[in-house]
Amino acid sequence: MKPPLDSRQLYAFVRLAHNGSFTQTARDLFLTQSAISHSMRALEEDIGCRLFDRLGKKITLTQAGEHLLQHAERVLNEMHVARDGIEALGKWGRSRLRLGSPASLCAGLLPPVIRSFKNEFPRCDIRIEGGHAHGVIRLLEEGRVDLALTVELPADERFEFLPLFTDELAFLVSPEHPWSQNSIAPRAEIPKQQFIVYDKSSRTWQLIDEYFREDGHSLNAPIELGSMSAIKELVKLNLGVSVLTPWVATRELAEGSLVSVGLGRRKLKRQWGVIHWRGRRMSLAEETLIRLCRAAAVELLAPHAAPELTQG
């Protein structure tokens, strides 16, 4: 593969193509006319064809020159954009933050966090990409996000996990469901229920499945939905039972359209946190976001059981 064209020669070529004068191009670039002529001859030799027709003092582009001009202008423009972006990042307060987060945190935890974050870093461009635990880790591996907010995964020496908060999963049922009356889920009745679950490829589903298998139960042909709102609506209609954390249904629990029932004496808890590349120094913006997430978690879990918060 041939090496790329010399950017300085391309810059001189574009200026010469536009003003049609070696003398003027030399003045514009603070070079001698012979230096411009030498540079253009070198560019033509590199490409292997003539780029200009020279008629006395008049310079016109050949067909090859016209073709190169289109590409050269695009390349140089991209280089200018890159320089401007880098210079903007170097200015005080100008930065970016890319997050990977599951939909539940995007809806429940992040809105107040982003509001507070933008007050502290108004010039920081923030972008959020959704996905379950394994999905946001893939985004991190591909360099598409800086931080991944997720349920704790099996240890990976490539990454560091910074705890945020711990929540607890429970049955969510309709007020018409028998379990809602005594807030008890008899173990013998669990396999008979129609379960409605969120994303069986997620880490949360793995935890739920492992939990019930340890008790010798297998959830009966669960219906899988990709929308938390849809799950809650079906449960409200008493079309099934779900296993979710109560904070995703704070409003429904408060108004009585859903009822939370404990899983039993043995609790099923999840540790939420932030994952980033081990050894990479975190920016002030990233450290601030983590602090705000921990503070928002207190408010998020407050209407339910007392949260187990992890300070770090």
Image (cartoon, rainbow, N blue to C red):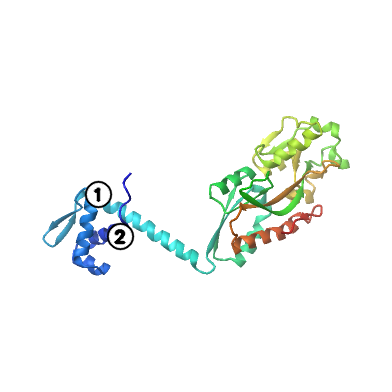
Mark 2 crowdedness (10 Å alpha carbons): few <14, some 14-19, many ≥20: few
Mark 1 crowdedness (10 Å alpha carbons): few <14, some 14-19, many ≥20: few
Residue 280 position within the rendered picture, expressed as x and y whole percent measured from the top left: 58, 56
The residue wearing badge 2 is: 8
Residue 281 position within the rendered picture, expressed as x and y whole percent measured from the top left: 59, 59
Front in this rendered view, residue 5 or 58 = 5
Residue 309 position within the rendered picture, expressed as x and y whole percent measured from the top left: 76, 56
Return the residue found at the far left: 56
Residue 284 position within the rendered picture, expressed as x and y whole percent measured from the top left: 60, 64
Return the residue found at the far right: 182
- Indicate whether 137 appears above or below 7: above
83 vs 205, left or right, is: left
- The residue sitting at 73% across, 49% down in the picture is 271
- The residue sitting at 76% across, 31% down in the picture is 218
Assign a secondary structure to mark 1: helix
The residue wearing badge 1 is: 47
Dot label at residue 264:
none
